[in-house]
Amino acid sequence: SGRKVGATFENWKTWPNTLRAHQLIAFVTSNDRLASVENVPTTAECNAALFEATYELGENISLVDTLVKIGTEKLRVGSEEIPRLRSYLENNEGAREVMKEIQSGRKQYNIRGVPFFIIGTSEAGQTPYGFSGAQDSSTYLEIFQELSESLEK
């Protein structure tokens, strides 16, 4: 279904374990970096870089070298940060926190697969929209219209 909405999967070669990829996201978006790095990448930018590497370039994102390359080439990890990033990934720093976050998402939103999108907040008693898989733009439009209408009430 991804191909229908532009995800071509041109060069998908591996089915990687994504724990370290999640750790890369945690590293590059961490509050520690916010204080010292300008223009910290968003989670969406991280996901796009990992998607491209896996499905379009055929890279194995479970390998530390691949993740360091993605970090430096796509996610603004500076040369001075490379030793820290490499150590972070090789020693599975942050793995426990990543697993807790994954388990929390599975429990709170009934996540069973990726990609999974959550739109909206749980603030003010509203339940966010959650859905899995690549979606047509009309799905997003419908959700945003419903959210907009609920905010006007």
Image (tube, rainbow, N blue to C red):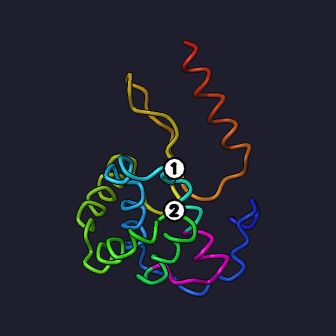
Give the class, few, some or many, for how many residues have Cα within 10 Å of label 1's Cα (few <14, many ≥20).
Answer: few
Q: Which residue is mark 1?
A: 39
User: Which secondary structure lies at badge 2?
Assistant: loop
Residue 80, horizontal then vertical, whole percent? 39, 69
Residue 41, horizontal then vertical, whole percent? 51, 54
Q: Which mark is residue 76?
A: 2
Give the class, few, some or many, for how many residues have Cα within 10 Å of label 2's Cα (few <14, many ≥20).
Answer: some
The quarter of the displayed image where residue 51 is located: bottom right
Q: Which residues are magenta?
A: 50-61
The quarter of the displayed image where residue 111 is located: bottom left
Residue 130, horizontal then vertical, whole percent? 50, 45
Which of the image's four quarters has the N terminus?
bottom right
Q: CA distance from mark 1 to mark 2?
A: 8 Å
> Which is nearer the eye, 101 or 33?
33
Please name the residue shown 34% across and 46% down the image.
Answer: 108
Q: Amino acid at mark 2?
A: Arg
Q: Which mark is residue 29?
A: none
Q: Amino acid at mark 1?
A: Asn
Q: Are marks 1 and 2 in contact (CB under 8 Å)?
A: yes
Q: Is residue 105 above or below residue 120?
A: below
> Which is nearer the eye, 10 or 75?
75
Please name the residue shown 63% across and 33% down the image.
Answer: 144
- 122 sits to left or right of 55: left
